[in-house]
Structure formats: structure tokens, C-alpha cells
Image (cartoon, rainbow, N blue to C red):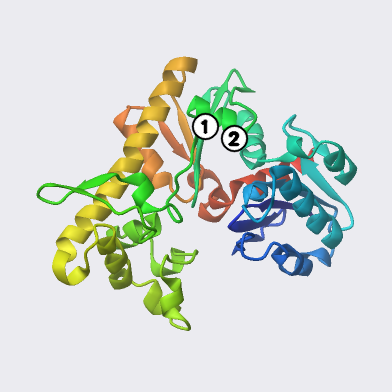
Amino acid sequence: MFIGIDVGGANTKIVTSDGLVKSLYAPLWKNKSILYNLLSEYAAVSGLEAVGAVMTGELCDCFVSRREGVLHIKDALSTVFKEVKFFNSYCTFKDSTAVDKAPLSFASTNWLASSMLISEQYEDAIFVDLGSTTTDLIPIAGGEIKAGRTDLKRLKNGELIYSGVRRTNVATVLKSVELGEECSVSSELFAITADAYLVLGYITDADYSCESPDSYAFTDREEAEKSRLSAMRRLARVVCSDLEELGEDNTVRIAAQVKRAQVDELVASLKQIKAKYQLEQVVSAGIGDFIVKEAADSLNMPFLPLSACYGKTIAATFPAYAVARLLETF
């Protein structure tokens, strides 16, 4: 059995070649040692042949630098498992000694593992993975991954949008909202995109896997924290109001404008990449494929959700799955 692990800053995802899928909320910035306990139960799995890993958690601000973050994650995984193969920016697996020598070549490689697997099946496509925090847009042309190899380069190229459907601050998505007339928004962290999609019905309270901005007010009352009513209250604060003053209809309008803004931002990047590489098809993974579908449809681009091929749980944890699959044939 092979295990693929994707260590993010907020979520760690684990997929085994025999079908186990886990997505665990593990905010490294709160406790960077959390990985040791989190992963230890998988170290004694019978029949374990190899463990492969990718990461993005090195960007957490609990680390002085990405270099420090990569080495910390490497140490945690190497302590828990006897031998780990780390996927690097050259699309190959290396052991921990290679990470020590060139740590930055192992930074932010989860999207690359996914793209490598996708490129074996779709030679010409834009691969989009819209998750809780970020959106990857990876051009694949002639079977070759064309995206920049660092997050900085991808941000410059429109291949990375730092916006997702769970953890993104609504105030970074919207600068103003239309409520009969234009209204500016507060820059405070009052609401996140999970609130918008809970209010609109795209997710349930069980899907609200991260902390809400006002989680401190709901100690031992998580059910109330992640209710639709609480989400509406948080959205109302974005315009320095409350549900009593604003009302449900206007709160729903704010949520709808969050969705519209995320779709529009994705459309702009898709249009740019489509024109640059003459690509027509969109292949989508992640928990936000409802956003990707709307964006692709607006551009009349054929849309293929990986959830239709692999199921929703694999599609939602695709980098970890890709690592396990790639490691099998390494």
C-alpha cells in the first residue's frame, strides 16, 4: 500500500492506494508540532510500502522562512515514517537528504503532483483546483506543464489566485457591495467565503471544516457557530451592520456577490491562459468546482469535473491522491 500526504497550512490530506481518504483540519500556524500526533496513527499501517509527500504549509507565518517551513515539515514526516519520498519541482521523488540540500525545490509542489498525473490523461487542458484557500490554474499543452514553478511566478502569471471557498476573508473578495446603492465593506475579518456558501446553500454546516472568524464566541457550541443564522450575522458585519438592521435578503445579496466576484476573477484568469496557450478544455478538482463550472460555462469551455471520474472525496484531496498514484509507478 502507498500513502500520499499533502501538508497544507490549514489542512493535511492523506490518501492511501487502497481507498482511505482523510482531510484533517490542522492549522500549522497555531501549533506547528501538530503533524507528529496527526500522522502517527498511519505509521503502523500494515502492508505499507512507501509514503510520498507534497506540501504548501511551509508558507505559514509560524516559520521565519519557507526554507525553515520545508525543513520542519520534512522532519515531522521523516520522524513519523521510516522513509518518505518527497515530490519536488522537477517532478521527481527524492529522500529527506535531498530536501536538506535544496529545500526550496520541495516548496509548494502539491499542484505539480496533481498536474503531472492529469497531464498523463489530458494533453491539452487547463487544470483548475479550487480549494478552501487557493485556486490553481495550470496550463497543460502537448502534455507539458506550462505553469511557473514557484507561487510567486504563478501569481504573476495568473496561474494562482489566492482565494478559495472556505477560508478567504470576504473583504479581500469584495471592495464594495450593491445594497440598493453601492456600499463599501469593512476590512476586518468578519466573514469568510464559507459563510457565503453556507448561506447560499452550496455547503452544509458539516462542510464548514475551518474555524469561523468569531469562533472564540462559540466555545463548546460548534453547531451554533456553523449554522446558517450565524453565517448571516457574520456577513452582515462586513458592512458594519447586523442581521436586525440589514435583514436576511440583503445578507443573501452579499453572499451572492461574493460568489459572483470569485467567478469573475476566475473567468479573467481562464481567459488569459486560454488565449496564451490556445487551450479549450477545463479539468477541475477541489471543493469549489461549482465555481469552476460557472466560469468555464461562461467562456463556453468544455468542463470536466474530476469528481465524475474519481468521486468527490478523491477530487477534494487530489494532490495527495496524485502523490500516491505517482509513487506507485516511480
117 vs 29: above or below: above
- Left or right of 313? Residue 166 is left
Q: Picture coordinates of residue 320 (x, y %)?
A: 66, 49
Q: Which of 216 and 277 is in front in this view?
A: 216
Q: How far apart are marks 1 and 2 (CA)?
A: 6 Å
Q: Residue at x 63, y 45 (%)?
A: 319
Amino acid identity at mark 2? Asp
Quadrant of the snapshot with the N terminus: bottom right
Quadrant housing residue 205: bottom left
- Left or right of 321? Residue 136 is left
Q: What element carries label 1?
A: helix
- Left or right of 180? Residue 64 is right
Amino acid identity at mark 1? Leu
Q: Which residue is drawn at 20% across and 54% down?
A: 253
Q: Residue at x 42, y 29 (%)?
A: 269
Q: Please tell me how crowded label 2 is: few (under 14), some (14-19), or many (20+) other residues with Cα within 10 Å.
A: some
Q: Name the residue under label 1.
A: 155
163 vs 203: above or below: above
Q: Do the residues labelled 1 and 2 touch (CB within 8 Å)?
A: yes
Q: Name the residue under label 2.
A: 151
Q: Picture coordinates of residue 222 (x, y %)?
A: 44, 77
Kindly give the residue lying farthest to the left in the view shown: 180
Q: Nearer the viewer, residue 47 or 243?
A: 243
Q: Which of 55 and 13 is in front in this view?
A: 55
Q: Picture coordinates of residue 77 (x, y %)?
A: 79, 56
Quadrant of the snapshot with the C terminus: top right
- Left or right of 177? Residue 216 is right
Q: Can residue 47 be seen in this view?
A: no
Q: Which mark is residue 311?
A: none
Q: What element carries label 2?
A: helix
